[in-house]
Image (spheres, rainbow, N blue to C red):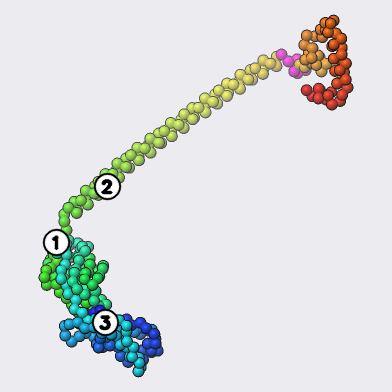
């Protein structure tokens, strides 16, 4: 659909829509001429429709004539008369950025819909058949502005009221200052706490390093004293040594001292026969090479 004043850009998609722009003989929308201005061979035609001669509504098919062939659309096109019924809110801050709700009929008619408060544009963010939402622009002064909307070549003015630009509320600035001050105070406190913690950690680290240095000196001193005592003991021991070095025993003496620490083997008469038998058995074991080797190693 589009306003009855015309000026709506219509895109027609199809197949076999000619090979060149010159193949397009005519395009009509509900009996109203639509002037082609762009063309994609065989698939697409773009045209701008003229308006009705008088205010009103009309609907009909789109008819395209390619050479001597006529093509008709499946859907109907409507010429409508958009109308504004109300706006909300009726006032907003000079800085802009307020959402203005506009209600009416056929609010989405046409290919280009624009909204203005006086000469200040209101950027459309959503658009339906019965409502439009836009964001107001900033104004250099306080004013009562009239709402105007363009629907292609058609223009609609809202005469039942106006939109008032008022001074920005002061509490916004005060609240902003308070918030910034609060944030700065929090940051300052955080920095002080961080600095104090960092200083504390540094002091603790220095104290630990100092304790480690003292401990190292103490350990070094104790090692030095222990080494001196060891040298003294070694010196004392060398006094007990013979001229040839460390004293030692020959193998026979050492073995006898370990096997017979008392110096002699005492045997009682009643046990002599039993001991003799055991010695015979021990002799047999001694003659066994495997036992002898194990015995020597043990």
Q: Quadrant of residue 113?
A: bottom left
Residue ID at (81%, 25%):
294
Residue 38: percent from left, percent from top? 33, 84
Residue ID at (19%, 68%):
102
Residue 166 is labelled as 1
Instruction: From the image, tell me which residue sits under label 3.
Output: 77
Q: Quadrant of residue 197?
A: top left
Residue 134: percent from left, percent from top? 22, 67
Calculate the distance from the C-alpha at mark 3 to the C-alpha at mark 1: 43 Å
Q: Quadrant of residue 225?
A: top right
Residue with the most extreme left position? 160
Residue ID at (46%, 30%):
210
Residue 296: percent from left, percent from top? 81, 22
- Element marked by disc 3: strand
Residue with the most extreme top position? 269
Few, some or many residues within 10 Å of mark 1 (<14, 14–19, 20+)? some
Task: Label the magenta part by its dominant secondary structure.
Answer: loop
Can residue 129 be seen by looking at this rendering?
A: yes
- Element marked by disc 1: strand
Q: Are marks 2 and 1 in contact (CB under 8 Å)?
A: no
**Which residues fall within the magenta stretch?**
240-246
Would residue 241 be found to the left or right of residue 288 on screen? Answer: left
Q: Which mark's residue is nearer the viewer, 3 or 1?
A: 3
Instruction: From the image, tell me which residue sits under label 2.
Output: 183
Magenta stretch containing residue 159, yes or no? Answer: no
Residue with the most extreme front position? 74
- Element marked by disc 2: helix
- Closer to the N terminus: mark 2 or mark 1? 1
Would residue 46 be found to the left or right of residue 81 on screen? Answer: right
């Amino acid at each position: 659909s589009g306003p009855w004043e015309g000026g709506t850009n219509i895109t027609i998609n199809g197949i076999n829509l000619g090979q060149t722009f010159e193949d397009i003989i005519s395009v009509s929308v509900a009996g109203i001429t639509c002037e082609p201005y762009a063309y994609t061979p065989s698939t697409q035609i773009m045209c701008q429709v003229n308006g009705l001669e008088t205010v009103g509504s009309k609907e009909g098919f789109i008819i395209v004539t390619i050479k001597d062939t006529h093509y008709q659309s499946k859907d109907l096109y409507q010429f409508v008369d958009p109308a504004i019924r109300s706006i909300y809110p009726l006032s907003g801050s000079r800085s802009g950025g307020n959402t203005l709700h506009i209600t009416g009929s056929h609010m989405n008619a046409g290919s280009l819909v624009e909204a203005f408060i006086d000469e200040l544009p209101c950027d459309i963010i959503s658009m339906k058949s019965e409502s439009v939402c836009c964001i107001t622009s900033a104004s250099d002064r306080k004013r009562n502005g009239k709402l105007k909307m363009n629907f292609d070549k058609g223009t609609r003015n809202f005469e039942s009221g106006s939109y008032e630009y008022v001074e920005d509320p002061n509490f916004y600035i005060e609240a902003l200052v308070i918030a910034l001050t609060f944030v700065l105070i929090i940051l300052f406190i955080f920095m002080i706490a961080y600095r104090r913690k960092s200083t504390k950690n540094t002091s603790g680290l220095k104290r630990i390093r100092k304790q480690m240095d003292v401990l190292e000196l103490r350990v070094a001193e104790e090692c030095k004293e222990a080494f001196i005592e060891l040298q003294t003991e070694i010196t004392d021991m060398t006094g007990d040594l013979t001229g040839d070095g460390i004293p030692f025993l020959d193998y026979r003496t050492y073995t006898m001292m370990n096997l017979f620490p008392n110096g002699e083997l005492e045997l009682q008469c009643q046990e002599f026969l039993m001991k003799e038998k055991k010695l015979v058995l021990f002799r047999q074991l001694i003659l066994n090479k495997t036992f002898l080797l194990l015995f020597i190693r043990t």
